[in-house]
Amino acid sequence: MSDNPALAAIRDDLAFLDDWDDRYRYLIDLGRAMPPLPADAYSDANKVQGCASQVWLLMNRNAADRSLEIRGDSDALIVKGLVALVVAMFNNRPVDEIAGFDAQAFFGEIGLRDHLTAQRSNGLASMVARIKAEAAKG
């Protein structure tokens, strides 16, 4: 996804920050900047299983260009930042590109895998799996 400007900006911003406390604050700010979901989106159908915190992903398929519009939210600040990262990664991307993108490699590249608890890592993997499963539906 080298042509994903949102993801490139996040990669550059995180590379600029030396300290992981600053990087966590940056992720929290990303989450705070996300618009809220409509009230009816906070449903069991949109809830991501496998996350310790509550996470909701709202996905709509664009048939014209075979992409997914993705929005999300969480009840925990750092997790909401992780949701924002995943949304930036996959929002409005073609489903074939979503299916082929190695999110875990990207998380390793930015150092995120080494700085998350096991629960948060599992939740992040669950978010990615949910999006990839929706993309795989065709």
Image (cartoon, helix red, strand yellow):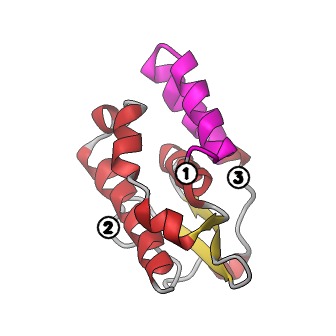
Q: Secondary structure at mark 1?
A: helix
Q: Earlier in the sequence, mark 3 or mark 2?
A: 3
**Label 3: how many Cα within 10 Å (few below 14, some 14–19, many 20+):** some
| Residue at 37 percent of width and 68 percent of height | 129
- Amino acid type at mark 2: Gly
Q: Which mark is residue 34?
A: 3
Residue 22 in sight here: yes
Q: CA distance from mark 1 to mark 3?
A: 9 Å
Residue under circle 2? 50
Q: Secondary structure at mark 2?
A: loop
Vertically, is 42 above or below 75?
Answer: below
Helix, strand or loop: magenta stretch: helix
Q: Earlier in the sequence, mark 1 or mark 2?
A: 2
| Residue at 41 percent of width and 77 percent of height | 133
Q: Secondary structure at mark 3?
A: loop
Q: Earlier in the sequence, mark 1 or mark 3?
A: 3
Q: Is residue 133 left or right of residue 70?
A: left
- Are circles 3 and 2 on residues that touch, CB within 8 Å? no
Front residue of 29 and 70: 70
- Amino acid type at mark 3: Met
Q: CA distance from mark 3 to mark 2?
A: 22 Å
Q: How many numbered dots are placed on residues in this image?
A: 3
Residue under circle 1? 80
In x, y percent, where is residue 78? 49, 43
Front residue of 51 and 71: 71
In x, y percent, where is residue 75? 54, 58
Q: Which residues are magenta?
A: 2-31
- Are circles 1 and 3 on residues that touch, CB within 8 Å? yes
